[in-house]
Amino acid sequence: MFEKDRLNILTMLDAVAKIFDYTKEYSRADEFYRSQRDFDAAMMNFIILGEMVTRLSDQFTEKFNQVDWYKIRGFRNIVAHNYFGIDAEEVWEIIQFHLPKLRDHLNIIKDRM
């Protein structure tokens, strides 16, 4: 694998950690959504996640195909191009249920590199 793939994975892990940090004080989607600063910061890091996916080599994404890279990139596009149409409940569900799994996969991948 290329060094840039490793750096992109590290950047993705950093973005995931920041999203968890920005949301740790909240117990519900509406609380999180009302905090414009934290909500905006988390959304920016979802954009970073998607951007890093686009920078991964094809060989890398084929080798580590247990991650749905396409969905991550797709969510980035939704956040970037339809920001005012984002459903806070859906974002909250992603953070609570999907992001921990992504973090776990990224850590496994990082350890295999």
Image (cartoon, grey):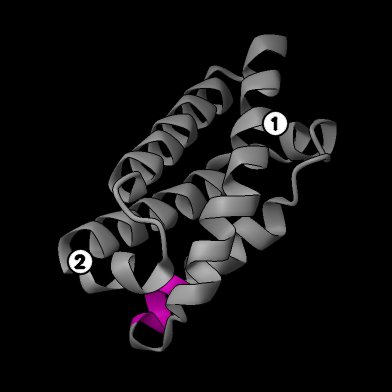
Hey, which residue is sitting farthest front in the picture?
27
Q: CA distance from mark 1 to mark 2?
A: 29 Å
Q: 37 or 53: which is nearer to us? A: 37
Hey, which residue is sitting farthest bottom in the picture?
85
Report the number of discs. Answer: 2
Kind of residue at badge 2: Ser
Kind of residue at badge 1: His
Q: Quadrant of the C terminus?
A: top right
| Prevailing secondary structure of the magenta residues | helix
Q: Nearer the viewer, mark 1 or mark 2?
A: 2
Q: Residue at x 54, y 17 (%)?
A: 3
Label drawn at residue 105: 1
Q: Residue at x 31, y 64 (%)?
A: 32
Q: Residues within 10 Å of mark 1 (few under 14, many from 20)?
A: some
Q: Position of residue 31 (x, y in %)?
A: 30, 68
Q: Residue at x 72, y 11 (%)?
A: 112
Earlier sequence position, callout 1 versus callout 2:
2
Q: Quadrant of residue 35?
A: bottom left
Q: Residue at x 33, y 87 (%)?
A: 84
In the figure, is residue 23 to the left or right of 8? left
The reply to whether the magenta stretch includes residue 92 is no
